[in-house]
């Protein structure tokens, strides 16, 4: 009982009681802040490690991802070229089928090579807009004009 009276004497005044309660509360707050700070420092270390791992993965995967994207673009380009080549093949097959027709082949030979049947007279018409035949390019002139121009050029001495 002597201990109880001593405590009563200790808490006899209200100001003393308030001071003791304030100290106890301050001690509890300090302990909780210390625990929270310790918890934060652990989380900060973990977060830093996690950030380091994520950054390492990003750096490690950046080059392969860039290669993957560029290869996918290359594949798409090759597929586009394949499709265009397939279209060209279809056009060439159509042209080959047209050349199998004798009437088409004859018409092309007569138009491009200026062939005429025996007894026919061949004419080359020059339109006034195009000028003289000498002004025409090699692709616009008949093949035999180009041939004879080549013979004339080779017959001349070099300058």
Image (cartoon, rainbow, N blue to C red):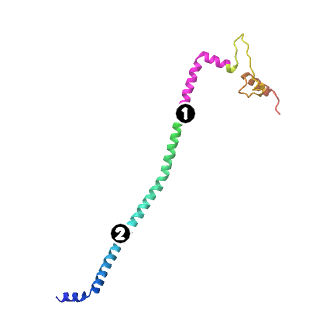
Check disc 1 and report its element: helix, strand or loop: helix
Q: What residue lies at 39% left-to-right and 64% top-to-bottom?
A: 46
Q: Give the image quarter of residue 1.
A: bottom left
Q: Give the image quarter of residue 99.
A: top right
The first of marks 2 and 1 along the sequence is: 2
Judge from the rendering whether residue 66 lies leftward or rightward of residue 154; answer left or right: left
Quarter holding the C terminus? top right
Pinpoint residue 60: horizontal percent, then vertical percent. Answer: 47, 55
Is 91 within the magenta?
yes
Which residue position is annotated with label 1? 84
Is 70 within the magenta?
no
Q: Nearer the viewer, residue 159 or 80?
A: 80
Q: Check the image and report above or below for 109 versus 39.
A: above
Q: Check the image and report above or below for 126 versus 53.
A: above
- Mark identifier at residue 151: none
Q: Give the image quarter of residue 2.
A: bottom left
Pinpoint residue 112: horizontal percent, then vertical percent. Answer: 68, 21
Q: What residue lies at 55% left-to-right and 28% top-to-bottom?
A: 89
Q: Nearer the viewer, residue 56 or 98?
A: 98
Q: What residue lies at 54% left-to-right and 36% top-to-bottom?
A: 81
- Disc 2 crowd, CA 10 A, few/some/many (<14, 14-19, 20+): few
Q: Nearer the viewer, residue 109 or 12?
A: 12
Residue most toward the front? 14
Q: Nearer the viewer, residue 132 or 17?
A: 17
Pinpoint residue 87: horizontal percent, then vertical percent. Answer: 54, 30
Q: Check the image and report above or below for 20 versus 119.
A: below
Whole-angstrom CA distance, mark 2 to mark 1, is 65 Å
Judge from the rendering whether residue 85 lies leftward or rightward of residue 121; answer left or right: left
Residue most toward the left? 1
Which residue position is annotated with label 2? 39
Magenta part of the chain: 84-110
Pinpoint residue 43: horizontal percent, then vertical percent. Answer: 38, 66
């Amino acid at each position: 009982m002597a201990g109880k009276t001593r405590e009563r004497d200790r808490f006899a005044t209200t100001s003393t009681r308030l001071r003791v309660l304030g100290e106890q509360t301050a001690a509890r707050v300090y302990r909780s802040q210390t625990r929270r700070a310790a918890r934060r420092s652990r989380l900060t270390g973990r977060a830093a490690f996690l950030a380091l791992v994520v950054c390492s993965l990003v750096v490690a995967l950046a080059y392969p991802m860039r290669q993957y994207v560029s290869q996918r673009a290359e594949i798409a380009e090759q597929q586009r070229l394949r499709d265009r080549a397939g279209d060209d093949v279809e056009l060439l097959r159509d042209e080959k089928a047209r050349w199998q027709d004798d009437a088409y082949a004859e018409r092309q030979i007569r138009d491009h090579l200026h062939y005429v049947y025996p007894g026919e007279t061949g004419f080359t018409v020059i339109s006034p807009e195009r000028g003289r035949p000498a002004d025409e390019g090699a692709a616009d002139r008949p093949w035999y004009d180009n041939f004879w121009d080549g013979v004339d050029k080779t017959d001349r001495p070099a300058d």
